[in-house]
Amino acid sequence: MSDNKYDQSFEVLEKRELVSNTFHFVIHAPLLAKKIQAGQFIIMRPTKISERMPLSIAGWDREKGTITVIIMSAGRTSTEATAKNVGDCFEDIVGPLGKRSHVTKFDGACVVIGGGYGTGAVIPTARDLKALGNRVIGIVGARTKDLLIMVEELEEVCDEVILTTNDGSIGVEGFVTTALEQIMEKEKVSFTIAIGPVPMMKAVSDLTEGKEIQSWVSLNAIMVDGTGMCGACRVSVGGKTKFACFHGPDFNGHEVDYTELMTRQKMYVEKEKLALDAMKGQEA
Ligand SMILES: Cc1cc2nc3c(=O)[nH]c(=O)nc-3n(C[C@H](O)[C@H](O)[C@H](O)COP(=O)(O)OP(=O)(O)OC[C@H]3O[C@@H](n4cnc5c(N)ncnc54)[C@H](O)[C@@H]3O)c2cc1C
Ligand code: FES
């Protein structure tokens, strides 16, 4: 690594496996660390021949010049990324991209909800909400207790964190919405942000609809350039076409056309499978 503070090596400084196929990386990226704000994202190319992969930011250290990301191996590019070890460098990272999360001081509680890598992504927004004097409650959901990630890190920035598992192995049995419903019965909720699988974000939006709750979701549309130029991440919000990378990634969850989002996410499934098979073939 060079001594020049403006040189971004994108070197992996720390790597930790959180659960099978999901890794926590601390990366040298001082320019990014200096500018990034809650809710924004980056686009990474793990190697020279990799595709561009959008990633949320789970944290940063402006002094040390590092950013933290959580990467789940889903296909070829994410597997190329999770194959990197301490001392290796990612080819390039661009960002910060997108708009920062919409936070302010609310009357009622703010509930931040994470599933999978989304649990890391809600941490910076939770920290901002807390700094504004809000009561912040976290909900982390997974199928079973061994798949819950980033709980301690979320606890550091929330007043309370509730765990939910589908099989009841820890915390509330059910979905993140089961816990959210219980909170809404007990106290006034003014704000929610949900980051994770689309069905989870849709379920949170459905539950909060018509209840005077600002309900934000971070849309993981397929992206290419990440700057609003290519149109790949087109989503319909409130009947209007928006670009998730430029106008978002956070949007009012009550206005998102989730059916269109899920259909567009599946556009390249066959090609994605071919790319992964080709990579496995090269390794064999
Ligand atoms: C704003 C944003 C933030 C993201 N943050 C993170 C993060 O912090 N950590 C993380 O692990 N992943 C994150 N993702 C998803 C990540 O970018 C995709 O998983 C990755 O691009 C898949 O590439 P691949 O080549 O590994 O898999 P592919 O072979 O391209 O796809 C494998 C599987 O992942 C699905 N997929 C592909 N692209 C996306 C996408 N953009 N969103 C959701 N599913 C997708 C495909 O439908 C397929 O089922 C984010 C996506 C966006 C748009
Ligand atoms: S990724 Fe190209 S417009 Fe959003």
Image: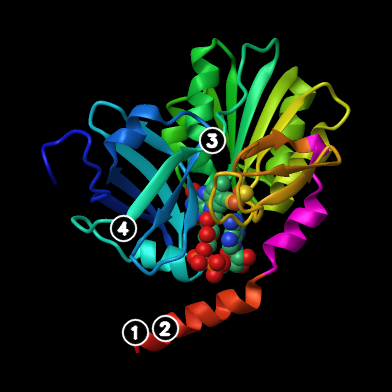
- Contact (Cβ within 8 Å) of mark 1 with mark 2: yes
Give how far across and how far down residue 117 sits, in percent. 51, 49
Q: Measuring 85% from the left and 25% from the top, which residue is drawn there?
A: 211
Dividing the picture into quadrants, the one containing residue 29 is top left
Please report the residue visible at 81 percent of the width from the left and 36 percent of the height from the top: 254
> How many residues crowd mark 1 within 10 Å: few (<14), some (14–19), many (20+)?
few
Callout 2 environment at 10 Å: few (<14), some (14 to 19), or many (20+)?
few
Q: CA distance from mark 2 to mark 3?
A: 33 Å
Residue at label 2? 280
Kindly report which numbered mark, 3 or 1, lies closer to the viewer in this rendering: 1
Q: CA distance from mark 4 to mark 3?
A: 26 Å
Q: Earlier in the sequence, mark 1 or mark 4?
A: 4
The residues tagged by marks 1 and 4 sit, at their Cα atoms, a distance apart of 20 Å
Q: Which residue is mark 4?
A: 91
Q: Which residue is mark 1?
A: 283
What amino acid type should be assigned to the residue bearing mark 1?
Glu
The tag earlier along the polypeptide, 3 or 1, is 3
The kind of residue on which mark 4 rests is Glu
Pick the residue in front: 108 or 121: 121
- Sequence-wise, the earlier of marks 4 and 3 is 4
Q: Which mark is residue 122?
A: 3
Magenta stretch: give its range. Answer: 254-267
